[in-house]
Each structure stands twice: as C-alpha cells, then as structure tokens.
Image: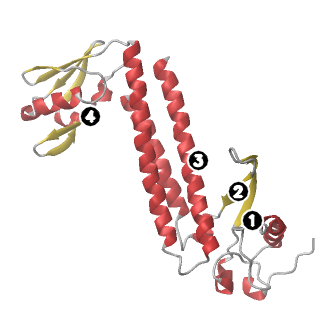
Amino acid sequence: MFVSAAPSHCAGIKLGELRGVWGLRPRVTEVRRGLPQAPTGCPSLLLDGCRQCVRQVLLTRQLATKKAKGKGQSQAKVNISAALVEDIINLEETSEDMQAVVEALKEDFNRNLSVRTSPGALDHIIVMTKDGKFPLNQLGQISLKSPQLIVVNMASFPESTAAATKAIRESGMNLNPEVDGTIIRVPVPKVTREHRESLAKLAKQSTNKSKEALRKVRSKSINQIKKSKSKVSEDTIWLLEKQVQQMADNTAAEMDKLLAAKTKELLG
C-alpha cells in the first residue's frame, strides 16, 4: 500500500503510525460511527482539523476477535493514548480512581470478611458518638483474650461504651458483645455453615457498593469529556466515552473475580 508523507504542519508523525492509521481506514469507515475523515492531506484524526496536528493525535480503533454476546458481531474496542488527549481528560487519573475502588474492596475483604474473627477485624468498625464518627480502635483498646474471646477496653472513652457496643452488634459480622462496665467482651462465633453464608452475602453487598463507587468515577469522567463538545468532534467524544466505559467494564470484571474467589474461600 502506498503511503504519502505527512504534510509539513504534521511534523513528528512517524511513517509507521501513518501506515497503521490508513491501514485501518477501509474497515473502520464502513462503520457508521467509525473514525472521522481527516482533513485533506492530513493524517491527524479526530480533533479539530489541522489546528490539532501539532499535538500528533492518532486515535486508533481496533476490532476485537471475540463476538459480542447474542449479536454474532465483532465487538469494537478503543485504544487511546492518555498523553494525546490530556487536554480533554486525564485517562491515567481515571484509571487510578477506578483501581482505588478495587483496592478498597480488597482491603474490606481481607479486614472484615474472614471466617475466623480476629481483633483486627474490629479495628475499623465505625462508632457513632455525640462528637462524630470514629473507628473503634481510636476509642477502645482491642485485644484477643483467648481464641474464643475478644475484649475491648473503653476506659479512655467510657461515655462511648454503649455506642461502641451497638456498632459491634450491628457490624454484620455476627457478633454479640457483652458489656461489663467499660469492658466489652466479644465472643468469637463458631464457624458454622450459616456464618459462612452470612459472610458470603456481606461480600456480595460490599462488591455492589464498590460497583456503585465505580459508576460514580465513570460518570465523573464522562461528564468531563462532554465539557469538550464545543472544542472537538462528535467522534472524539464518542471514542473517549467508549474508552472510559471499557475501563469501567474491565474494573467491574476484576471485582467479579475477587468476589468469586472470596465466596469460594468463605463457603469452603
């Protein structure tokens, strides 16, 4: 295939990149919302004509080999370089925000959803007091008295003993604390089938909450992209939105894998 040289105002674009772009055109332009036509003689795609050529924007659309569910058609995928669209949206930041949601879910699984209750599992139970919300480990001293008993000493904040007891009981960890003055005794529940199933349900609930947080990250990014409607082409907006959606889908799939592994661990 013959590939012409880039015009002078498109300095810095490599011949290999040019060949890759034009090589995709016969297939992509058949799609209604494929890559838009570049200005005459200009290999730069998507953004507003030659004014953007100096930014060397080359957004490529690739066709996946897997078929879309129930449609029997190739599923289009987008691969956009974050550096080339940073004036519109910071894709790296979006990726980091999505990954932070995954890491928070992992931490929740490890800290709060274990078959064997440990003192550390109580650390971050949130206690509602008249002065605000506080993690339990900031109000009381938590220790393991025996393999079957966890003790919380509330001597430093005795006025919060009742609130701490309530928070432990309503933590969803199947705990039934007993109060003796400023001492809260928490018997470690036996590992029953019912307890395992209860933890598995909590894992599902935590995953759903994390997916809701993920949707908020996605929506924030989509709204950021739409703010550039007056500056870039409709196809640019569409491709970027599709890129963000792909990132969100991949993150959600990662969460599903974490949930499956945790559920298998809890149910035994």
Position of residue 14 measured from the top left corner of the image (x, y, whole percent): 79, 73
What residue does disc 2 label?
76
What residue does disc 4 label?
125
Q: Residues within 10 Å of mark 2 (few under 14, many from 20)?
A: some
Vertical placement of residue 116 versus 260, above or below? above
Position of residue 45 measured from the top left corner of the image (x, y, whole percent): 70, 75
Q: CA distance from mark 3 to mark 4?
A: 30 Å
Mark closer to the observer (1, 2)? 1
Q: Earlier in the sequence, mark 2 or mark 4?
A: 2
The answer to whether marks 1 and 4 mark residues whose Cβ atoms lie closer than 8 Å is no
Q: CA distance from mark 2 to mark 4?
A: 44 Å
Q: What residue is at 48 percent from the left and 43 percent from the top?
A: 102
Question: Please, what secondary structure does the residue beneath circle 3 have?
Answer: helix
Q: CA distance from mark 1 to mark 4?
A: 53 Å
Using residue 259 as the reference point, say whether residue 19 is left or right of it: right
What residue does disc 1 label?
31
Mark closer to the observer (2, 4)? 2
Q: Residues within 10 Å of mark 1 (few under 14, many from 20)?
A: few
The image quarter containing residue 139 is top left
